[in-house]
Amino acid sequence: MSNWWKEYPWRMIQPNFREIDTDNFDEDRFIEELKSFSCNAVMLNAAGLMAGYDSELEDHVNSRFIDNFDLKHLVDRCHENGIKVIARTDFSKIPGSVFERHPDWAYRHPDGSELNYNGYVQTCLLGGYQAEYMDQILEEMFAKIPFDGIYCNMGSATGYIVDYSMKRHGPCQCDTCKAAFKAKTGMDIPVELRPGDKASMIYFGFQQEIASAQKKRITSLLKKINPDLAYCSVDYSRQEAHTDFGAELPSWQYQASSAARMMRGMDVEATVANVDFMGFPYRHPSCTGALQELRLWQTLSNFAGIDYYVIGRLYDKADQSTFERVKKVFAYAKEHEDLMYSVKSVSDVLIVKDSYIIPNPEERGWVRLLSENHIYFDETLMGGLMKKDLSAYKAVILPSKNRLPEMMQKKLSSYAENGGIVIAAGNTVKLECCGIEEAEKTDRNCEGAMFLFDEKDQETFTSFANRSLLITGKEYEPKKYQEGVKKYGAYCEPERFGPPELCYADKAPTELPAIAVNEFGSGKGITVPWYTGSDYYRDGHEAFRLFVKDVLVNICGIRQASEDLSEMVEVTHGRKNDTEIIHFVNACGHFGNSYFEPPVLSDVTAEIPWEHKSAIVENLDCPGNAGYRIYDGKLQVVVPKLGFHACITIKKGAD
């Protein structure tokens, strides 16, 4: 079957074998356990850091525990049971014994030392191992074992190296890297990478070029070996939803949802791996079951493949406390796979993001703001924006995008000129459609400053009818606007905030706005010159959410899925052939940094446009537990009782 991964109903399990897990391995029991999870794909450790099969290559060291383990036979057994098998590889490290023979393969610190973690040495992107030897390993592996695809762990180019203690290490300073960077740029490799630093940005671009060339080379090799091999990051994409023990708050409750939308926004097949464990230091205890179930429902409800990642063998895992929850969602996905996969999202808004990996508070805040205002939306990376047909969206949101290629700026202005709305939030590049003359130079620390909404502003910002003030947070980006740009909310200079007797304004409001709206062609360019998303992500105050609701609904004319739905219920809208699909995910069990079973909610509603006189509405989770009404060109779904999840399907009735 050609390109088997396209529209494949991914239900993948990754039992990340420790080297001891292939000792006394019970193949029959393992296969039965996979089947009990309703999985149709499994990822098995194969090559790189250590060989999971009998490798004949001198510098591809075999695992010590494979004498009585046959990886090929296990792969064949999986295939006999209808399970695709992905080879897990990791070429980021080599055993110390290999390093001793090939010291030029290693990453180097500025002092020339290698990075050794538990006896395994970090490799360099330009070193002979990743530049040449990994090709030999791949050729041997696929010649010996009929895998269906490959996943390369630790394959991203992020500019720096992060070890398993979460310690960052700067750019590689090996002789090969230094010579290549010098030849290309005339510069020395920076020792440390700093945001906004020119040399750091140049190095990051240099590293991206190397990684891109490697990906192109490996793609060519794999397709030559077998055109039907699925290569992760090329043919399909996979990201993790995980817990980092001791991570800074706030807890990112939309991690799986956002990852699914973002990968889908790059127009590739996508899975989100629900990581079972609590973080690198604690690989064996499972994190909270309610959190794992939430991640799986979020992934499925955002039209991506589900994926479960555990350490070790399933059948004798020490902590199996979450298995039943995971099995429940996997079984549901299997039962309804015709309506869970290959679904096209139907959304009004697109958020543009910088990275799969690096968290951006402004982006995360806008994800929260749209989710909790019940706006149907998609996400994409900067690299996917040029491929997008923006005419499908009413608005495109740019959270702090202060570097946009000229071609991208032109595309956004053309989109606005033809009826779209571009919302530039935070520190975003000056776009033609936004009507900005210039950004002013100022001290950006504005703690204590506020926006004043007068009666005229409140005609548009209806949520502020009984409040006239909105805080700015800590930073504001003042700009000069062209004549005719509509302004709302007046920036008031920071007040004294102590002692209480002195807490009053002693300066008149300025001409600087909370938001500026520029009519551009038949569309708009909107500037939000402060960090609304970051403020909401960090502090969560209702006023930020209401401000954005009024911007989107009253200024942009974007519909809410529901006006009375709990902010903690996520709602998505998709379409497959003649069926409209609405998912509800109840996240009311999220409290601070804990996740519990959510309470059952009553009379949950959502709306979609509807031009027909009747409809057939079904609840896949609980047949009969759904009603609807049609009015004013809309169909409103009503779910009398919502547990963790509901999927509602809607078809045209007999008009």
Image (cartoon, rainbow, N blue to C red):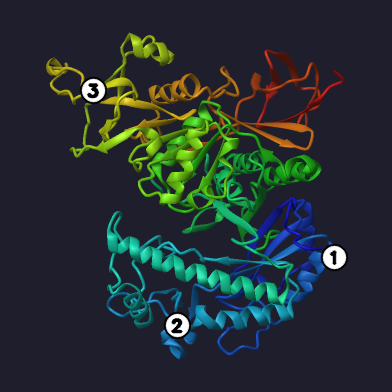
Q: Quadrant of residue 508?
A: top left
- Residue 192 is situated, as x and y percent measured from the top left of the image, at 29, 64
Q: Quadrant of the C terminus?
A: top right
Label 3 crowd (10 A; few <14 / some 14-19 / many >=20): few
Q: Amino acid at mark 3?
A: Glu
**Circles 1 and 3: CB atoms closer than 8 Å:** no
Spot occupied by residue 239 in the image (x, y as percentages of width and height): 56, 54
Q: At which x and y percent is residue 246?
A: 41, 49
Mark 1 or 3, closer to the camera:
3
Dot 1 falls on a residue whose secondary structure is helix
Q: Distance of mark 2 from mark 3, alpha carbons?
A: 59 Å
State the residue position of label 3.
511
Marks 1 and 2, the one that precedes in the sequence: 1
- Work out whether 136 lies above or below 603: below
Q: Which residue has dot 1 on it?
A: 80
Say which label, 2 or 3, has the lower sequence index.
Answer: 2
- Label 1, label 3: how far apart the Cα atoms are: 71 Å
Residue drawn at x 44%, y 88% as measured from the top left? 100
Q: Amino acid at mark 2?
A: Trp
Direction from residue 93 to residue 578 in the image, left or right:
right
Instruction: Give the answer, above or below, for where 426 lies relative to 163.
Output: above
Query: Residue 371 in the image: x percent, y percent?
Result: 53, 31
Mark 2 neighbour density, 10 Å: few (under 14) some (14–19) many (20 or more):
many
Please tell me which of labels 1 and 3 falls first in the chain: 1
Give the quadrant of residue 49: bottom right
The quarter of the rendered structure image containing the N terminus is bottom right
Q: Secondary structure at mark 3?
A: loop
Q: Secondary structure at mark 2?
A: helix
The residue carrying mark 2 is: 105
Number of marks drawn: 3
Point 35% across, 69% down: residue:
171
In the picture, the disc for residue 198 is none
